[in-house]
Image (cartoon, rainbow, N blue to C red):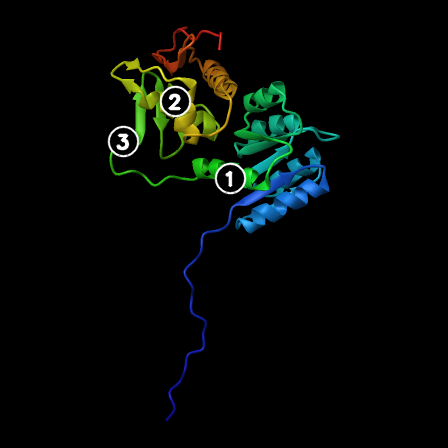
Amino acid sequence: MPCAIDLAPLTAPSAPMPHTVLVVDDDPHIRALLVFAFEKAGMAVREAADGEEALAEVARAAPDLVVLDINMPRMDGLEVCRRLRATSEVPVLFLSSRDEEFDRVLGIELGADDYVVKPFSPREVVARANAILRRSAPRAAPPAPAATRDHGLLTLDAEGWTAHWAGTEVPLTVSEFNLLKALANAVSGSQGRILSRDQLIDQIHGPGFAITDRTIDSHIRNLRRKFAAAGGHDVVETKAGVGYRLGGCTGGPGASKSGD
């Protein structure tokens, strides 16, 4: 009697879902270049030709990353980022057609994670996007130190990627959280060690990552503004000409000099 053969398909091990990137640019040629580059890198890509379409796409299904042109008609990228940050912490990578520090710094202050200046290499855009996605990916809990760190009224949860001030969560972008964590990791006893801007760039992005010192300054201003709104006025201290360190986090006025 012939053997019965089960032709039911075998269940293959589930592969990780690809990252989804939303490319927003009014230039169809640039969108086509980036779509090709991201798809070649194994990512799923959606497109939007203007800011209003981008907001609708994010509302329909949140992507893992938004690649956002600054200079667009109807609604520019800065306004799109401002509206996104009102409801979402989705990572944002800006594309700027002008190498103007004002645009770049304002974009970072609005909550963007990085920027690339046009004309650009699609490979560089993908590389920077991958760096942002790696930083925002959930991390496996390390076997050693505790994931939660307390310093005064500040609590950082490295596993949950959350920051709390006096028990109230303070929403941070990935870059802001990593910056605050780097400052917290430099605390010994009650005193924080001063880290230069270059040291902070290396810890947040990795050695050799090309961003300006002003980007770090913008992240610091964002951190101070967000914690000040929760009552934390001494979270980050400035050492003029040297760098930054974690403050006492007691809720007092602290020494957060603004000449940064």
Residue 77 lies in quadrant: top right
Q: Position of residue 63 (x, y in %)?
A: 56, 41
Picture coordinates of residue 142, whole percent (x, y): 29, 38
Residue pointed to by mark 2:
199
Q: Nearer the N terminus, badge 3 or badge 2?
A: 3
Q: Secondary structure at mark 3?
A: loop
Label located before the other in sequence (1 or 3): 1
Residue 120 falls in image quadrant:
top right
Q: Which residue is mark 1?
A: 127
The secondary structure type at the circle numbered 2 is helix
Residue sitting at x 48%, y 8%:
258
**Residue 230: image location, x then y, percent:** 45, 16
The residue type indicated by label 3 comes to Ala
Query: Element type at marker 1?
Result: helix
Report the side of 102 relative to 133 (left or right).
right
The residue carrying mark 3 is 146
Q: Is residue 126 left or right of residue 193?
A: right
Image position of 240 (left or right of 38): left
Q: Residues within 10 Å of mark 3 (few under 14, many from 20)?
A: few
Q: What is the three-letter code of the residue carrying label 1?
A: Ala
